[in-house]
């Protein structure tokens, strides 16, 4: 059986800028999330997978063919691109219908209506898509990508701008497509979205494949990294000396009499114990703030280990 | 219905709808209207006298009419109108990223380019040729000048539409480069040297105008067959280049 997507040592650079660096993986049926911060190279990688740009090095094969060379292969790939612009004078139905006609579907009108129904949009709405909200435009993009029921579906940040209900609906839709045996690749920079997809995860950071595998394994890896926490209290020196002998604390730097930065490999345990330890030492806690819980630092850890 | 028709027609309609905007039509329509007014003014001033063009003595009214059609219609209205619509036909989609919705379909790139070119020509033709024909008639230079103006403007539009369609895929500043081509190359450099003149669409359009109207305007003159063949060949080459470019380039 042919692998749906095969990325083999792919690199892409634009002048001096390396957008994707020596990335290899292969994907089959099911949902795969491409997780990474903004600028990690996700969109570039997805564009390479759809043939929109040529890799500077390496090769990509989709359904056994070269997506850059084979025009006919585009019939089997559905893409939701990142850019927002649509043919602004077209209604949602006209937009999706155009895709259906160009894809050579035998019953383009029926297919367009079905695709719009899938994303809960009214195919009789005469308003041009230029007047749609960001979330509605996003759903139109998903509808045009799914109109031919392609074997490979590539979605670049498809949940951006959607309200929570629509977000949930599309996540379920993507899962269903994966369960039907399609290869679905969804990029995101939001950890919670990826968690809900409950899928295989590829973590891309600074153009490199930082981690890959089941979401839970990636999550554990992220949770195990050292966390830095700023603690403000009535006596930082007294608290620091006790903390250093506590399990999971790898460092404590006293900034001034009332502030210190603690480094811990067990953030959850630290959060539970800090109040007890402070009470034991008769120190009054004023503030406990995680310093690097943002995604950027998570990705940085996965790439550099820092 | 053939596959080519089923895909080319929707793209043709799409390009037509995206490039025809009220401001563009209004601005270029106003330019055409100015030409009509000037044509009537020339007609009102006609006195039936004779004038010298090159080595020939010709009716002054015909000469004034031909010069006007050449200067206004073939050197300004036709290239600028073609530039505005043709450069936008694929260039606008390229710029806002919607080109991906055509590119990622099993449609030959040549069909996309041909549809964009056809839409540009179809929208430019009435905006250029109708006022130019009215203006030529209004100068009272005779029906030959009207036929010459229509033929020359049509051939010029074919070449310009193809060239600027390709230009829209080459640079994001197609309007600036197109205007530089029209006014610096064709309007300045090509008037200075005979060899450069042969690399300007305007030279062929002017020669065609002279051929059909029977009045040879001063400047580089191209032989009869070439005035038809060269602009069409240029158009074909430009469309070939646009197709090649669309196939090879990165799509946003």
Image (tube, coloured by chain):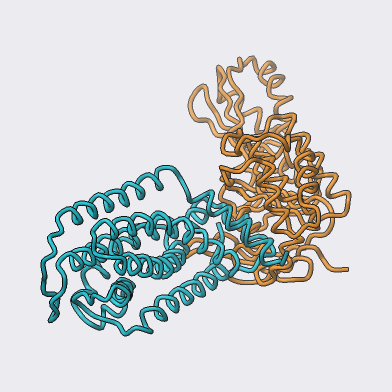
Q: Is residue B207 left or right of residue B165?
A: left
Query: Which residue is drawn at the image coordinates 32% and 55% (left, top)?
Result: B134
Task: Specify whether residue B174 is in view.
Answer: no
Q: In the rendered view, would you say A161 is above or below B227? A: above
- Tell me residue B33's x, y (percent): 31, 48
For the C terminus of chain B, the quadrant is: bottom right
Image coordinates for residue B106, horizontal then vertical, percent? 69, 64
Q: B43 or A144: nearer the eye?
A: B43
Q: Is residue A57 above or below residue B6?
A: below
* Drawn side of residue A238 relative to residue B135, left or right: right
Which color has been applied to chain A in this rendered view?
Answer: orange
Q: Is residue B248 left or right of residue A227?
A: left
Quick one: B145 or A52, which is closer to the camera?
A: B145
Image x and y of residue A249, in percent = 68, 36
Which residue occupies 38% across, 84% down? B225
Q: Quadrant of residue A216?
A: top right
Question: Which residue extends farthest front?
Answer: B48
Quadrant assignment, res B226: bottom left
Colour seen for chain B: cyan
- In the drawing, does residue B180 fall left or right of residue B99? left
What quarter of the picture does the N terminus of chain B occupy?
A: bottom right
Residue B128 shows in the view: yes
Q: Position of residue B250 (x, y in %)?
A: 55, 64
- Which residue is depicted at the point 31% across and 60% down? B179
Residue found at x 27% / y 76%: B214
Q: Nearer the viewer, residue B183 or A150?
A: B183
Compared with A178, B202 (above or below) is below
Say how many tags the image has: 0
């Amino acid at each position: 059986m042919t692998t749906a997507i095969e990325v083999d040592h792919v690199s892409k650079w634009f002048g001096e800028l390396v957008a994707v660096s020596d990335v290899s993986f292969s994907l089959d049926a099911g949902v795969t999330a491409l997780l990474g911060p903004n600028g990690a190279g996700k969109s570039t990688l997805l564009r390479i997978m759809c043939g929109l740009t040529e890799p500077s090095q390496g090769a990509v094969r989709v359904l056994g063919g070269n997506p850059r060379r084979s025009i006919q292969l585009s019939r089997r790939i559905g893409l939701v691109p990142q850019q927002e612009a649509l043919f602004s004078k077209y209604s949602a139905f006209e937009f999706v219908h155009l895709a259906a006609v160009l894809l050579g579907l035998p019953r383009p009108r029926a297919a367009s209506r079905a695709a719009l129904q899938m994303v809960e949009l009214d195919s009789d709405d005469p308003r041009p898509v230029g007047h749609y909200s960001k979330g509605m435009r996003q759903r139109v993009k998903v509808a045009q990508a799914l109109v031919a029921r392609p074997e490979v579906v590539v979605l670049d940040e498809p949940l951006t701008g959607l309200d929570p209900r629509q977000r949930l609906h599309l996540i379920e839709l993507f899962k269903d497509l994966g369960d039907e045996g399609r290869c679905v690749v969804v990029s995101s920079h939001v950890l919670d979205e990826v968690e809900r997809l409950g899928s295989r995860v590829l973590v891309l950071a600074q153009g490199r494949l930082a981690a890959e595998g089941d979401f839970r394994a990636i999550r554990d890896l992220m949770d195990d990294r050292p966390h830095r926490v700023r603690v403000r209290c009535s006596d930082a020196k007294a608290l620091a000396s006790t903390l250093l002998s506590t399990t999971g604390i790898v460092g404590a730097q006293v900034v001034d009499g009332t502030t210190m930065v603690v480094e811990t490999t067990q953030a959850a345990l630290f959060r539970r114990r800090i109040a007890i330890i402070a009470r034991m030492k008769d120190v009054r806690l004023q503030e406990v703030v995680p310093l690097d819980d943002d995604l950027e630092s998570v990705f940085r850890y996965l790439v550099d280990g820092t | 219905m053939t596959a080519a028709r089923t895909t080319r027609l929707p793209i043709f309609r799409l390009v037509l709808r995206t490039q025809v905007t009220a401001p563009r039509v209004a601005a270029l329509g106003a330019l055409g209207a100015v030409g009509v007014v000037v044509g009537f003014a020339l007609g009102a001033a006609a006195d039936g006298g004779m004038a010298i063009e090159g080595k020939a003595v010709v009716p002054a009214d015909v000469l004034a009419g031909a010069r006007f059609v050449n200067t206004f219609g073939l050197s300004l209205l036709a290239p600028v109108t073609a530039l505005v619509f043709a450069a936008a036909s694929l260039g606008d989609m390229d710029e806002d990223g919607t080109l991906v919705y055509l590119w990622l379909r099993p449609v030959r790139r040549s069909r996309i380019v041909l549809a964009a070119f056809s839409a540009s020509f179809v929208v430019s033709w009435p905006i250029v040729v109708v006022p130019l024909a009215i203006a030529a008639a209004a100068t009272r230079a005779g029906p030959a000048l009207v036929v010459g103006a229509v033929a020359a403007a049509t051939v010029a539009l074919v070449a310009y539409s193809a060239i600027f369609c390709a230009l829209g895929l080459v640079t994001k500043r197609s309007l600036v480069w197109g205007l530089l081509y029209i006014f610096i190359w064709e309007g300045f450099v090509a008037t200075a040297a005979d060899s450069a003149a042969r690399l300007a669409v305007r030279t062929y359009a002017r020669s065609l105008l002279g051929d059909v109207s029977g009045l040879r305007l001063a400047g580089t003159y191209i032989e009869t067959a070439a005035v038809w063949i060269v602009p069409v060949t240029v158009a074909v080459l430009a469309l070939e280049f646009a197709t090649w470019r669309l196939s090879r380039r990165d799509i946003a």
